[in-house]
Image (cartoon, coloured by chain):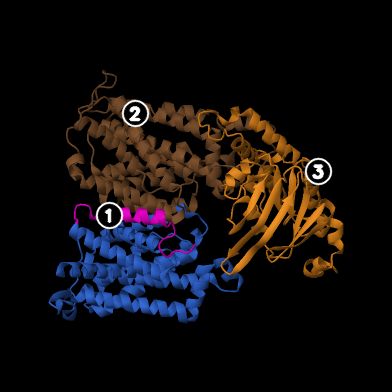
Amino acid sequence: MHDVAPTTTPHAWLARQSRWSWFEIVFWLATLLPFFLFPTYLTLASQIAIAALFAISVDLILGYAGIVTLGHALFFGLGAYTVGLLSARLGWGEPISGLILAGAVAGFVGFVASYLIVRVQHLALIMVTLGLGFLAYELANAMTWLTGGTDGLRGVRMWEIFGTFRFDLWGYTAYTYSLAVLFLGFLVSRTIVNSSFGLALRGIRENVGRMPAIGSDHAWHLRKIYTISAALAGIAGGLLTQTTSTVGLDVLSFQRSADVVVMLILGGTGRLYGAILGAIIFLVARDQLAGVNPQYWYFWIGLLLMVVVLFMPKGILGFLAKLAGRRG
Amino acid sequence: MADTQPMMLKTDALSKNFGALQVARDVSLTLPRGCRYALIGPNGAGKTTLINLITGRLKPDSGTIALDGEDITATPAAVRVRKGLARTFQINTLFPELTPIEAVTLAVSEREAVAGQFWRRLSTQTEAIDEAFAILSGLRLADVATRPTRILAYGQQRLLEIALALATRPKALLLDEPAAGVPKDESAMLFSVLAGLPEDISVLFIEHDMNIVFRFATRIIVLVSGGVLVEDTTANIRTDARVRDVYLGHGAHG
Amino acid sequence: MSNLVIVLFDGFAFGMLLFVLSVGLSVTLGMMNFINLAHGAFGMLGGYVTVIVMRQLGLPFVVALPAAFISAAVLSIVIERTLFRRLYRAGELNQVLFTIGIVFVATAVATWFFGTVQQPIRLPAWLRGTVEIGGIRFGTYRIFLIAIALAITALLVFGIERTRLGAQIRAAVDNQRVAQGLGLNVERVFGITFALGSGLAGLGGALAIEIVGLDPSFAFHYLVYVLIVVSVGGLGSITGSFVGAALLGIGDVAGKYFVPEIGSFLIYLILVAVLLWRPLGLFGRR
């Protein structure tokens, strides 16, 4: 790939890194296929879109800035409960404002948490993210009067989107809506990773110790991306509540934090499409395998994780890109 | 005259202990504007530690550091860089997956405080990219500007170390063995690049090859066991008996 | 008053169990910086080996304990040689994911063979019942557990301070590169330490059955406790693991006894607070 001398200027080379490719346009057109090919799977498709948005939010901090997190369900759950409580306790079910509020609440908590996150590294970082996730779960569990605890929150009712589109049983509205939000979140993330800020994040990932020596206040960069990532995760959580009309404690569970990292690793970190591909593979596989033998679903996920880590360190998408690069 | 304007970089009685080991002992240095000083001394004399203290990677136990007349003893490392104090590392500490144009553009945009702009495409930051490319061209890295750093030749990575430092537009530049590990023929190239640095930058460099030291430095600071043994002009150091004893002794017959 | 004593006693006993489960991970993490989330899976293996030895083979509990130790140690050598070795330089995320993968697989395999039901064992008569001291009844098994843990602690401290292997381990934890430079075969030392640590986890798994039960979720559930002990105590520190485990055990039991609504909440709160106050743990040095 890199064995020919560059014939272009660095400007052109940099511009090419962020240009829309045919692959991307085809990919997004293909996301419309479920409407025609699998109309009975639209509910699953909207779950995938939500998981993909969540995975993108984790990719921003884990894949781009290199900050490992095992507790991002905290922000997903915050968003989910924001929307849920807004409807069940205050009677407000307007979707768009609900999503904005979900993002704002999660983003604010993310901003506060980011001051803790930038203080620790390595095992302590993993443990702090894990600890914050468990804290949120236990808190929600203890406040059953508010959250409904393990039984879930009752009485979540969503209004029509734009006052017109009702959430239907077959998931037409849910998928259209989730896909639109995913696309918007993707556009925002794509802008971020292709900006000089995105470059600074990759610098942090590649060598955080070197950042001060080029005059970078990298802790501030990290706080910023952590806040943005938390807000996106909150929006994904809000979407889940809106499309399923229910919230349970599982939105805050460690399982959810771990699953999203697994999706990301399967697809490939540091690539937005890796996050999306990972979500598709993970949820489709779970849908197919879990029906057969729910107990052993995690056997295959575990095996797949080990194989990916050993043989495809850049994920399935990175592996494919390498194959394509070798051929081209 | 030198005493009417502040020194570019000044340390006063800088000391640091690691447990019982004293790694910096009362180090007082002054670097005037545009100087070319060498810092020499046997292995373990504390040369890199001194640079770490000056740049803020380590905190001194006592003593002060001033850059261009301003006390920076308590200033965070990144802020010192933005105030004009840059360094390179003895062992390449680069960004393996970034290309040189990306790494240097990053350093430039950090200096210009545009690195936090997440709404603007990187490729539209033309001024930063232009400047980065000019720096790389000046260091003969233009050809490899768009290749990942990890595949560059070792000597090219050493040059990129310098490029990153220059991108911060330093007033004072501390080079920690810039030619370490570079083959002889390439190290001459490296130092010709250093000779071409802007005249008003104050340079302090650590180097073991005495030929290079005598050729490029106007003054030499000799560090032994964390303390300054002697500081003098190149010509005087050449004939200094103490220096010959502790340092040149090994290499004199080589 | 007697309630408080019992809670402290039970908590300390639980803490000693956590110490046996986690001390191996603390030492290996301090030495190689290898984040092995499969440590709890070795504990689970020890538990199931105990169940097999006692139920299928009909052998006594005191035979099952060394069997649990040995089987976990042997399996860990195999896994270290074939798999973990490739990941020492792979970055923490890859280590975390790979070893979580092992936990997933181990959990599924345990479910396949044993189902999701609890696996109780029948203790020998001399370990059952209680002992009355000063009018308070202490569980015999918990006294046994504390005695074993204290014996292990004494052995470890003696081993680390006084034996040749101990000196090598200390050197490797202190500074791996220097140790290697001095001609120490760090890989070998690590292999042995890893086996001993996993063996202790296996023993811990065997001892845990009577206290917390055994089912396929053990590997994951107790991993969280183990990680808390290790990160709060500080990597590579036996003292740290001991203190961390005792604190966590007492805190967990006391929390669940006195404030059952927010018991676990407090544990996590303390975890986050300690790590922000001392990111390297209470006894961490690097």
Which residue reaches farthest top? A164
- Name the secondary structure under disc 2: helix
Q: Position of residue A216 (x, y in %)?
A: 57, 42
Disc 3 residue type (three-letter): Met
How far apart marks 3 and 1 lie (CA) works out to 66 Å
Tint of chain A: brown
Q: Which residue is mark 1?
A: C266
| Closer to viewer: mark 2 or mark 3 | 3
Residue C121, above or below A51? below
Which range of residues does the magenta coloring cover?
Answer: C259-286
Q: According to the rendering, which colour does chain B have? A: orange
* 2 and 1 marks in contact (CB < 8 Å): no
Q: Secondary structure at mark 3?
A: loop
Number of the label disc, if any, that sits on residue B1: 3
Left-right relation of A174 to C236: left
Closest to the camera, between mark 2 and mark 1, is: 1
Q: CA distance from mark 2 to mark 1?
A: 32 Å
